[in-house]
Amino acid sequence: MLKRTYKFLCLTGFLVFFPVVLSNNTYAEGVFSRGEWRLELTGVADIHSGKADRDGDFYFTGSIEYGWPIFSRAVLGLKAYPLFLYREKNDGCGDSDLIYGAGAGICARIYAKRDARTGLFAEVSISPIWHSDYLEGNGSRVNFLSEVGLGYDFDNEWHVALKWEHFSNARLNGDNAGVNGIALAVGYRFRRNQETVAFSK
């Protein structure tokens, strides 16, 4: 158990503090300062779990992200989840349950267009999430939310994305019945200015 806890703390520290440390050098400060805030609401319908009945489960997340360009097509971001609401249709006792939580992690996004940060993009993210109660078949109240998705950033700053999400405790506990689902996300980006800033080559 101590070994698993140590691994969790190390991974969480890396996810949260590595981008901050990166931003401390002079070059990175210039890139970091050109970042943008991004808000997103996501709804997820659980479609599969190998060890627990997730039929009828669904959850919502609300995230706040600060992302900055690292290449001409790529953005790295810090992502916080102040909102995590999971409705479990069957909590193992035949009753439904509403579970809430919060977390933070890291994400990356690659755009099809160079220097624009608009149009088609692909993204990945991982974030440890603490939640108020145990999920059926899962012995930890800290689980990792992993996302892989495709989306589109419109010129009016709104975006939509379709994602595949996985939620499990990475074997911090022997009971690790995870959650898999398809997510639909919608969000808004706050540009630092109205002009598209090209990445310095």
Image (cartoon, rainbow, N blue to C red):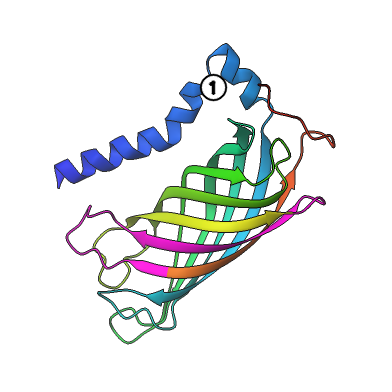
**Which residue range is magenta in the image?**
154-180
Between residue 50 and residue 4, name the one nearer to us.
50
Q: Residue at x 44, y 78 (%)?
A: 57
- For this orientation, the residue located farthest to the bottom is 94
Residue 155 location in percent, x, y?
81, 50
Residue 125 location in percent, x, y?
47, 48
- Report helix, strand or loop for mark 1: loop
Query: Label 1 belongs to which residue?
Result: 23
Residue 117 location in percent, x, y?
70, 42
Q: Residue at x 59, y 31 (%)?
A: 71
Q: Is residue 65 above or below residue 153?
A: above
Q: Residue at x 41, y 82 (%)?
A: 89
Q: Is residue 56 left or right of residue 122?
A: left
Q: Is residue 90 left or right of residue 155?
A: left
Q: Is residue 102 left or right of residue 28?
A: left
Between residue 66 and residue 91, name the one nearer to us.
66
Task: Please identify the quadrant where the C terminus is shown.
Answer: top right
- Look at label 1 and name its amino acid: Ser
Q: Is residue 83 above or below residue 26?
A: below
Q: Is residue 74 above or below residue 42?
A: above
- For this orientation, the residue located farthest to the right is 194
Q: Is residue 128 magenta?
A: no
Q: Residue at x 41, y 37 (%)?
A: 15
- Res 140 → quadrant: bottom left
